[in-house]
Amino acid sequence: MTMNLDDTNVGGQLKVGSGVVPAVGEGNERINGSLYAEGPVQLGDQGAFTINEATLMVGRTTNSDEDCIPARITLKTKGNVVIEGDGGSAQALVVEGDQIIIAGSLTQSNLQLCSGQSCSWSGSSINVQGWKGFDIEHPTKEKHRLRYVCLEGPEGGVYYRGRVTNKTYIDLPDYWEKLVDPTTITVTLTPIGAHQNLIIKRVEPTRIHLQSNGGIPIDAFFHVIGARADGERLSPEYEGTTPQDYPGNNDQYSIAGYHYDRRTL
């Protein structure tokens, strides 16, 4: 038997299915406003699922009511979320599509599979000596690969390089004014074609002033390096036994072998 109702308000408890449900209470011990559904339950788009795939299946909202504002997402929570796998499938959590962590750290993770050019870690031991780099198919040799590792140093350094021709200055990107501490800027010049006796006359946040001997036209490669100013200074050496002992703000860093790249040896 089916009943069609315009509106239904349940002041106590709503149960769909059978059985005793301790989590929502029973009889005089029931929790007002609680709901139990034996499942399966589907919400949202009627055609999103064609068979029973889960206890709770949620599709995108397709409500055509003029008072219903279309939503861009299917599920949003405000509060902490815990997922406890029970072995019903190979993975406790499967995500298709890009992900982003807006704040906080991904810790105690045993990530085993990545897509695209980046792959990460498995197991639970820590590779604290990991060199950060990339490994790709060789661009010119068949059945070869190419592996590079990152340049490392005791600062959060950034660089800007290029060629300066017939100018007495190097213009840096506008954002360097806020990104880089101007007192840390160093410049390397490589003259092209002839000795030009180049010197650095003056360093400004977004411009490097040059001078050549006798006003010779300048033609040189340049490499400008500076330390980032949008965070605290790095402490290269510190007392401790794990990265957790770092004396500064650990949220500023992503450390191989601690925040990611945990491997089984």
Image: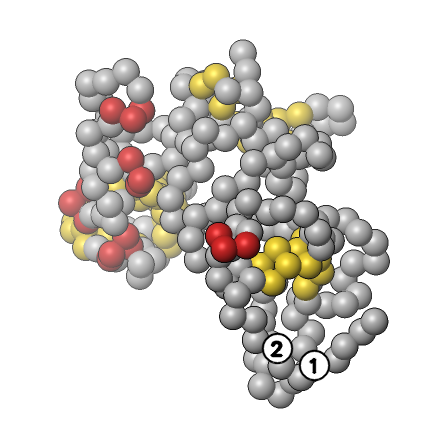
Which quadrant of the structure image shows residue 89?
A: top right
Image vertical order of residue 69 relative to residue 83, above or below? below
Image vertical order of residue 106 relative to residue 39, above or below? above
Q: Residue at x 58, y 59 (%)?
A: 35
Residue that extends furthest to the top in the rendered view of this protein:
265
Q: Cβ–Cβ below 8 Å for labels 2 and 1?
A: yes
Tag 1 secondary structure:
loop
User: The residue under label 2 is which amino acid type?
Assistant: Thr
Image vertical order of residue 21 relative to residue 139, above or below? below
Crowdedness near tag 1: few (<14), some (14–19) or many (≥20) residues, C-alpha within 10 Å:
few
Image vertical order of residue 7 relative to residue 10, above or below? below
Q: Residue at x 72, y 48 (%)?
A: 54
Q: Could you tell me which quadrant the C terminus lies in?
A: top right
Asked whether, in this view, residue 117 is left or right of residue 2, the answer is left
The answer to whether residue 187 is seen in the rendering is no
Residue that extends furthest to the front in the rendered view of this protein:
28
- What residue is shown with label 1? 5
User: The residue under label 1 is which amino acid type?
Assistant: Leu
Q: Could you tell me which quadrant the N terminus lies in?
A: bottom right
Disc 2/disc 1 C-alpha distance (Å): 7 Å
Residue 216 position within the rendered picture, expressed as x and y whole percent measured from the top left: 28, 51
Q: Which mark is residue 8?
A: 2
Viewer-closest of 214 and 99: 99
Crowdedness near tag 2: few (<14), some (14–19) or many (≥20) residues, C-alpha within 10 Å:
few
Which quadrant of the structure image shows residue 198?
A: top left
Q: Residue at x 24, y 27 (%)?
A: 246
Tag 2 secondary structure:
loop
